[in-house]
Image (cartoon, rainbow, N blue to C red):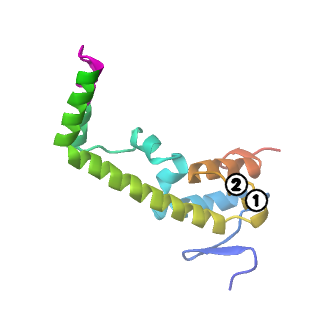
Amino acid sequence: MLSKNQIAMGKIKVEALNLSNFYLWSNQAEPYLVEKGYEFHLRYEDFNSFARSEDYVKTDREKRFELKKEAIMRSGESAENKENAVEELEDRFQDVGTKKANEEKAWREKASKVKGLLKGLVDDHIWVNVEKLTSAALIWKQLKIEAQTKETGNFVA
């Protein structure tokens, strides 16, 4: 049975985050969130930040699209000709845009879920200080500050 301040994370019972248990809490909460598939939501503020990172794996087709688009943008053509060429390229590579749009939608859905999980894992008096933040990554960073730490496991006296 759970006590008032405990949360069930799968089969693990953990105390809700408070100002005195960040190290223990983060060592249980972070692996749980990673296991659930939210690792990148704790590291990147939005899908575009993630998509620009080395963690985002691009298909060969996406790589070809980007190379061709970069070549168009570097060409000596007028801005209007570049715009027309990019539009034609996007028409030929519609699947790339559709894939990214679907991934971004999935990202937003997961972002909402991870914020809900974090809310359940944090004492209400701490949550009020982070609830208006726009991403799980910002919330995660602020929780470290709220718990008076700079990095996971390093307490500030």
Reading the image, the residue beneath label 1 is: 126
> Can I make out residue 91 in this image?
yes
In the figure, 74 relative to 66: above or below?
Answer: above
Please tell me which residue is depicted at 67% across the width and 61% down the height of the picture.
25
Q: From the viewer's perspective, is the residue at label 2 or at label 1 nearer? A: 2
Reading the image, the residue beneath label 2 is: 130
Task: Please tell me which residue lies in front, 46 or 90.
Answer: 90
Give residue 51's position: percent from left, percent from top.
39, 43
Task: Please tell me which residue lies in front, 138 or 55.
Answer: 138
Does residue 77 show up magenta in the picture? yes
Give residue 86's position: percent from left, percent from top.
24, 31
Which class describes the residues within 10 Å of circle 1: few (<14), some (14-19), or many (20+)?
some
Q: Amino acid at mark 1?
A: Ile
- CB atoms of marks 2 and 1 within 8 Å: yes
Task: Please tell me which residue lies in front, 100 or 23.
Answer: 100
**Left of 66 or right of it: where is 151?**
right
Residues in magenta, as a range? 69-79
Cα–Cα span, label 2 and label 1? 7 Å
Q: Residue furthest front?
A: 80
For the N terminus, which image quadrant? Answer: bottom right
For the C terminus, which image quadrant? Answer: top right
Give residue 125's position: percent from left, percent from top.
79, 62
Please tell me which residue is depicted at 75% across the width and 51% down the height of the picture.
146
**Left of 43 or right of it: where is 24?**
right
> Can I make out residue 67 in this image?
no
In the figure, 91 relative to 125: above or below?
Answer: above
Give residue 91's position: percent from left, percent from top.
19, 41
Q: Amino acid at mark 2?
A: Val
